[in-house]
Amino acid sequence: MEKVRDNLNVHKERAILVSAIIKSRKGPKYKDDNLAELTALAESAGAIVVSRFQQKISRINPSTYIGKGKAAMLWDRVEEYDADVVIFDNDLSPGQIRELEKIVETKILDRSELILDIFATRAQTHQARLQVELAQLQYTYPRLARMWSHLDTVAGAAGGTAAGAVGGIGTRGTGEKQLEIDRRLVSKRITELKRNLADIDKRKLREIDGRKGTFKVGLVGYTNAGKSTLMNALTDANVLVADKLFATLDTRTRKWTLNGSTDVLLSDTVGFVRQLPHQLVASFKATLEEAVNADLLLHVVDVSSHDVFEQIESVNKVLKEIGCGDKDIHILLNKADVISDTGTLESLETIYPDAICISAKTGLNLDKLTQMVLDKYKKGEVTIILTCHPGNGKVISFLQANSDIIERSYSESAVTITTRIGKAQLNILKRHKFIELKALDN
């Protein structure tokens, strides 16, 4: 069993998927497509799904999660399909993984480990790679003892003697030595990664702070809901679009011109998923800062999904976790062009009467979306009269780029401009010297 867990990547491996639903517990219900999302996750990781194994259990078995009898049935399934890996839709403890691997005699992964594996293959930028590595190490650290347990029988120089058995001075076993070495190495690397990411966080926050004068819009939603397609439709972002989970991990921010003159910043964030490992949420904090600091969040919902209501709930849970629960959030019902269940769409429109039904792919109602964002932007506008020297090109250029100029008049020593401007932009304008400002409304 020493080599079972040497390689966690599941690319091109034959996989059996397992879902264990606890009968008495509130939460996921037993249904025919209960493994649909895990199937998509496994295929996104490159695995070949050869069988699906769903079980109702009365309680969690502390040793094997599903019980030794069902584990034996799982071994039969592994033999029948010549499987290389078994992937659970549940989160397992290190001990449960170890015992299951003894019975099933093949590699066992849980849901969190699979998602971490997908993130590792999707990470493209230096920041994303550091974030994924940190999440993986934080997941692995408490599991090191179990992963090295196969060396516990090596007692050290004293062999099987009493002194060796109790770990006398100078006789610590090889397994314990290797475990301690691994723990030190992992702990050191975690500290190093946190320090590097903290430096990136500071640069990211400075970058976000530099946008304080601009209205910021963030795209959030379940993975594969169509955020990247929408980003491309609204801007020239040219973000990768693929029909797979977590196709993009890196946040991209682009200028979005709403009515030919009003510019806002639109950011695409990493997709969420049910039971997103908390290590990833913590590691991707800097990436999610775009959502935290946005003035408006557009929650993109895939209305064609069978689990659309659960997906909305999962996204809202993560948004609360990162401090966005009280943000101005607007629902976008995407993929309306391919929905077959009109009853689901009608229910969503009833629950979310302000939602906009769109298709990022065909452009359906993107004009309504643009107008809604423009209205949100204008709610923060005020009308002002500004007077400054005609040669103050910096101020005049700022107004031309960030406000709707209503009227302007010139004299030999001054230019007077009446304009409507956002409150955030007005705060920046007030920092300029040698100007006079008068507000006409609040």
Image (cartoon, grey):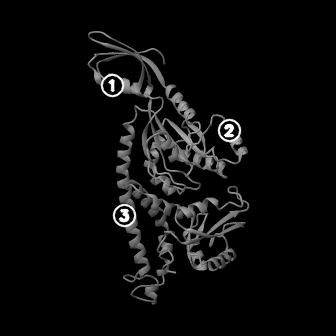
Distance of label 3 from label 1 (alpha carbons): 51 Å
Which amino acid lies under the numbered mark 3 shown in the image of this protein? Lys
133 on left or right of 48? left
Which amino acid lies under the numbered mark 1 shown in the image of this protein? Ser
Name the outermost residue toward the top. 411
Distance of label 3 from label 2 (alpha carbons): 51 Å
Front residue of 184 and 36? 36
Evaluate whether residue 424 shows in this view. Answer: yes
Mark 1 secondary-structure assignment: helix
The label number, if any, that marks residue 188 in the structure image? 3
Residue position for label 2: 349
The percent coordinates of residue 271 (x first, y second) are: 52, 50
The percent coordinates of residue 340 (x first, y second) are: 69, 48
The label number, if any, that marks residue 288 in the structure image? none
Residue position for label 1: 397
Single out the mark in the foreground, 3 or 1. Answer: 1
Q: Which comes sooner in the sequence, label 3 or label 2?
A: 3
Which residue is at a point 37% across and 68% down the rendered structure image? 185
Task: Using the image, determine if residue 34 lies above or below residue 363.
Answer: below
Which residue is at a point 40% across and 66% down the rendered structure image? 186
